[in-house]
Amino acid sequence: MPDLQFQATINGRKISRSAKPHQRLLDFIRDDLNLTGNKEGCGAGECGTCSVFVDGTLMKSCLLPVAKAQGTTIETVEALAKTGELSVLQKAFHKTGASQCGYCIPGMVMAATAALRTNPFADREEIKERLGGNICRCTGYQKIFDAVELARDVQNGTLPASALMEDEAESGDFIGKNVRRIDTPSKVSGRLKYAADMTMPGMLHVQVLRSPYAHARIVSIDTSAAEAIEGVAGIITSADVPGEDGFGVFVNDQPVMAQDKVRYVGEAVAAVAAEDLLIAKRALSSINVIYAPLPSVFDPEEALCPGAPVLHDYAPDNVTKHIPIRVGDTEKGFAESDLVIEETYSTQPIEHAYLEPEAGLTYVDHDGVVTIVSPDQNITHHRHMLARIIAKPISKVRFIMSPVGGGFGGKEDMIYQGMLALLAMKTQRPVRLVFTREDSIISTAKRHPSRTVLRMGLMRDGRIRALRMKMICDGGAYGLSTEGVMRKAAILAAGPYVIPNVRVDTFGIYTNNTPSGAFRSFGALQTAFATESHLDICAERLGLDPFQIRRINAMRDGALTHTKAKLGSVSLMRALDALEKASGWETGAPTSRGEIRGDLDRPDIRPPCALGARFAAAEKREAAE
Amino acid sequence: MLTCDDYITPASLDEAFDAMAAHRSHYRIVAGATDTLPWAREGRAGDVHIPVLIDVTKIHELLHISVGDKRVRLGAATPIQRFLDDTNLARSLPAMPRCAVWFADDQIRAQATIGGNIVNASPAADATPCLIAHEAEVELAKKSGGKITRRRMKLDQFVTGPNRTELEEGELLVGVECDALPGCGGSFEKVGHRRSLVISLVCLATLVKLDGKGRYIEDVRLSIAGIGPKPLRLNEIENFLRRGPVSAERFNQAADMPVSLVASRTRQEYRREVVRGFVLRGLINAARAAGAKPDTLTPELEAAYA
Ligand SMILES: Cc1cc2nc3c(=O)[nH]c(=O)nc-3n(C[C@H](O)[C@H](O)[C@H](O)COP(=O)(O)OP(=O)(O)OC[C@H]3O[C@@H](n4cnc5c(N)ncnc54)[C@H](O)[C@@H]3O)c2cc1C
Ligand code: FES
Ligand code: FES
């Protein structure tokens, strides 16, 4: 069928090339023109990092069939700093620290450029609105808006160009100063190469076959039809693992690909390396796997019941990890208390949604060193595990950490690097796997969902006498970081409060859900959510101000934690003071207020977002004219 | 992932119909492609192969816009962004810019078309209810026996349910005609899981025309989506308010009326609450935009629903 003769002016240069009729503009500029500055974060129009100008209008190139851009003038992020000199906006991003992992930044810079081209005087609200199609998972946006405002003022001459320069140190002191990050120019210009931006000559494209079952025995895998497809260079299954299979952070309970059975929907079963993505996809659909479904369990409390389906032979009770903490005598503490309150709290699984989906490039180098380039948050540990899995000495395994486009704990697990190593070894060619957003969501760890029963005994004056907590977490099908998360959750369960009697049990449980793993705060969120919510409820029952109940119980300098760590200094009191002041807190017990709190709707509290800033701006302009 | 063997971009209706005839039952129409590409992804349709894609966004007639005194004609391939950029159009269709600013984002609006929004017929589509409030009629065309024939129907009859319309095999949506309503006040209320770049759970378009003194309602139109399988005009409320005074009391009474219409399968209680609030807020915002005298709307009412 006909390829398309695609003609356009791209970043000031005329091009004429053949393109596939189904290609998206994003693929064409990244794969065919090697302009990898603009990224793919979602492929579905949601994140904006693929935004480019088409005839001067900003568009999301992941939603644009290349044929739609026929004959147009296209500017990618590379056009903004064409000669190497950053644009005013890019410099402003550098100055304010607007870029962290940087993966959203090409799109942000483009959207900001579009906003200021449309309205060079846009105020902060209008800037926010015009950047509304772009997602950043790292910065919280404020520094990005600061950057756009700074660039606007420099462009309009209300601030001198020197405002873009780095703050000077004051007598050698940089604290409180904007020190520019050295990696920012590479990010705002799109020059930094993330794993999905890297290619090698002769590189193959990898796709992964995933389990449609939550729990099933693998009866057979037949790859013969897929092997026969022209352009398929190699297919691997668990049978291709030469060494001792199994990875994890604390227990090596997860095989590179499912061995005898699958334990969650999305688990890797086989992987294909082929000349292009379409061939690899076609090969996947030609692999014939026969499954015998097994009973599955999706609730950790059910998984603890006798007779529940067992996920791993080594853990017949489905317990991945139990962490107990015992201090004093909680029963005595409750008996001594004036008031005992028990509540149940639960939290849900959460996806990290780092803007960069997983990707990896792997090759066997001239010395036979298996080299894995990926945004991997734990390369040293992974290097040791992989050497064992592929039965090579450690000197023949190398991990290179590519720029991590956001991780938040979600890239600590060796979910796909093992498959890449096996395929590179099998084909002796470079191989690359780029996850779609959907791959990333279906197969990688989530924050542990939790259910916590918390019982607290207090004296009438607010002092806590005893705390008993039992938290059950859904660890999903494999251990990953569960053990560490349970430990941290338990250690921090009783909060920074002096409590003489503490009994904490945290349990990580195997189920047939997507594995849970590391996520910012590593277990502290789940227990702190329970403990802090509980303190508010207790404050209400005791007629105390929520700040007051925390001050009454706060650990002070020199305190001993519930796990006997001695704290030299404790900043809790200062943090409470600062928080109370900044929030404009209306002092009093939660019950002391009427229907409406007095500390809401203040001018320094951000109102809920209401779109339409551009209408207000237009009205103002009209009024001025 | 969407793949095709050929991507055809006809320049005229004739060329489009010829391509459709040549590739009968092997093609799919695309306009902005903003519904079509995300649809062909894992979790929805997955990998899809469509032999021929026919792109209608370069057909002159589908891009043409004419603004008359009584009616406005919009080509089906009009991108949503036009309602924000074209001040003449915005003046004649006062609720559309408010709808547009809540629709996706600046980038997608430059690409997404009204025709795609209508034919895709999602119960959460934003432009459709708003066009219905402007008394929209669709114009459909097909070619048979070498001749292009056309028919028209009311937009609220054209959309029959979730992803269902009266569009026939071989037929194209060529345009939409609506009432020109300069001087009316328009509003668009929308709620979804977040504020920016989100599809509606419920949305409401409101148009209010006041007398010269800004105290009486001469005409009012409300159209709502997300509470049932297809968008609805709230005729009973319109009749109740038409030729009555602008007052907090009447707006409150109106807001209590439509809740029985909530027929969606999920979160009924929540939607009832939203509808009550939206009718009130929509009327206030539209009346204010139409120049209602400030004393007609009590400050409490404004504060509670602004
Ligand atoms: C990130 C994102 C955010 C979004 N936000 C919103 C939102 O806030 N509100 C909202 O309502 N929608 C939203 N959408 C959905 C989408 O953008 C709209 O529905 C848009 O109007 C679809 O138009 P299109 O031209 O892109 O449709 P296309 O994908 O091109 O077409 C959609 C369907 O209509 C058919 N079709 C199109 N034109 C014609 C024609 N002239 N004749 C016959 N058939 C035709 C096509 O065959 C196809 O079946 C969003 C989409 C994305 C990706
Ligand atoms: S919007 Fe295009 S990749 Fe996310
Ligand atoms: S800096 Fe924005 S996603 Fe990381």
Image (tube, coloured by chain):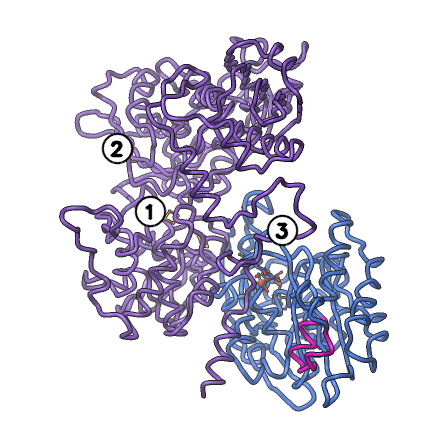
Chain colours: A purple, B blue
Q: Which mark is residue A100?
A: 1
- In depth, the one of B259 and A309 nearer the eye is B259
Q: Which label is found at residue A597?
A: 3
In magenta, the rendered stretch is B283-297
Q: Quadrant of residue A161?
A: bottom left
Counting residues from the start of the chain, the first of labels 3 and 2 encountered is 2
Q: Amino acid at mark 2?
A: Ile
Q: Residue furthest front?
A: A461
- Which label number is shown at residue A499? none
**In the image, are marks 1 and 3 on the same chain?**
yes
Q: Outermost residue, left direction?
A: A171
Reply above or below: B185 against A154.
below
Chain on which label 2 sits: A
The residue beneath circle 2 is: A400
Give the residue displayed 30% in from the left and 40% down from the top: A203
User: Do the residues under discs 1 and 3 have CB atoms within 8 angstroms?
Assistant: no
Chain designation of label 1: A
